[in-house]
Image (cartoon, helix red, strand yellow):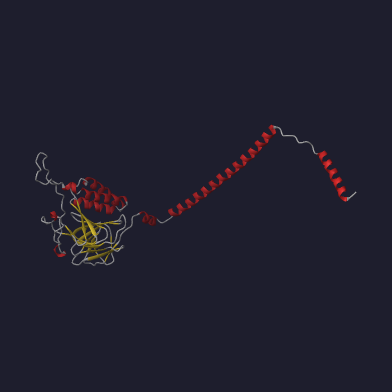
Amino acid sequence: MSGQSRHALLAARLLRSARARIRPQRSSPPDHTIAMLAGVITVAAGRRRRRRVAWIAGVATGMLGLTLVLALGLKKVASLPATVAREAASPTKQRFIAEGSAYASVTAADGQVQPLLIGQEWHAGERLRSDAVPIALTGVDGTTIEVEPRSELQLVRADVERWFRLARGAVSAHVAKLKAGERFVVATPDAEVEVRGTRFRVTVVPPDEACGQGAVTRVAVSEGVVVVRSLGREARVEAGEHWPVGCPERTASSVRPAPERPTVQAKRVPAHESTVGTKPAVNEASSTLATENDLFSSALKAGREGERREAVELLNVLLTRFPNSPLKQSAESARAKLSESLQLVR
C-alpha cells in the first residue's frame, strides 16, 4: 500500500472517532435567551451610568476650580490700596496749572485768599482774580485759558464736565478736542457758552438795552463752533462770528463788573383782549427752564459722583442767575444737604 493510501485511511478513522464523540446540539429555550439579553442590557446600562457619573464628576471639579480662581482674583482686587480703588471708580480729573504771578489772587472755597504762583494748580471751587496783567492756565489735555486783566473766573467743576463761571472781565480759551461725554461750559450772569474744541472769547460787559436785549455777555469765535444759550434761546456761533449779532465787542480796558441779571416776568395779556397786530407775550421765566434744568441736573450728577463741592458751586450759579426759578426750592434743599455733608467730612 502506498504512502498516500495509508494517510487517507488514517484521516478517515480519525474523522469517524471525532464524530462519535460530538453530541447533537440542542436549541436554547426562550427563557434562557430572554435572560441572556436582559443581562447584556443590564451590563450596557451600567456602563452608561458609570460614564455619566464620571462626566458629572468632571464638570463639578471644573466648576470648583473656576470658583477658586475667581475667589483668588477678587481677593487680589480687594487687597488694592483704597486710593487706587477710588481713582478707578471716580471720573477723570482735569488739572489746570497757572503760569501767573502775585498780580493775581485765588480765593478758596473756605474764603481764604492767597496769591497765585507759577506752577500752582487751580482747584475746583476756587475763584481767580486777575489784576493788571493777564493770567495763563494750561490743562493736562492741552487746553489753554487766558484770564484777561481785572477779571474774575471761578472753576466750578473739573472732571469730564468742566464748568467755569465768569463774573466779570473776559476770558479767552483754546479748548482741545473733547471726547464723548465731555463738556466745556462757561457760565456768565445771563448765558451759557458751550464748546466742542475751538478758540473763543467771552466777555461780561455793562448792560445795553439797545443791544442784545440788554444781555451782558459777548462771545467772539475765531475757530470752530460754540453754542450760546440765553433767555431760552440757543444760537450757533461759528468762526468769525460774534454774539449777540450787531453788538460791538468791548475791549478789556472798558470792561467793568456787570450785575447779575434777574429773570423778568413778562406781563400777561388777558384772554378777552384781542392779539391782532400785536406780538404774543413771552414768559421769560419758562423760556430759561432748559438752562435751569441743565445746571440743576449737572449739580445732581456731580453730587452722585462724590463731587459735593462742585455740586454746591453749580447750585450757587443756578440760584444766583435765576432767583425766581421754579427749581429754587429743590436747589436750596439740595445745596443745604450737600453743604451739611461737606461740614461733616471736615
Which residue shows up at 69% across the image and 34% down it? Answer: 32
| Residue 285: image location, x then y, percent | 17, 47
Q: Quadrant of residue 114?
A: bottom left
Which residue shows up at 60% across the image and 42% down it? Answer: 48
Number of on-image labels? 0
Say whether residue 251 is left or right of residue 28. Answer: left
Identify which residue, 55 or 155, lies in the foreground.
55
Q: Is residue 112 visible?
A: no
Say whether residue 140 is left or right of residue 285. Answer: right
| Residue 30: image location, x then y, percent | 69, 32
Which residue shows up at 48% across the image and 52% down it? Answer: 72
Identify which residue, 25 or 252, lies in the foreground.
25
| Residue 340: image location, x then y, percent | 27, 49
| Residue 234: image location, x then y, percent | 20, 53
Compared with 336, 178 (above or below) is: below
Compared with 247, 42 (above or below) is: above
Identify which residue, 115 or 85, lies in the foreground.
85
Identify which residue, 217 or 100, lies in the foreground.
217
Q: Is residue 337 visible?
A: yes
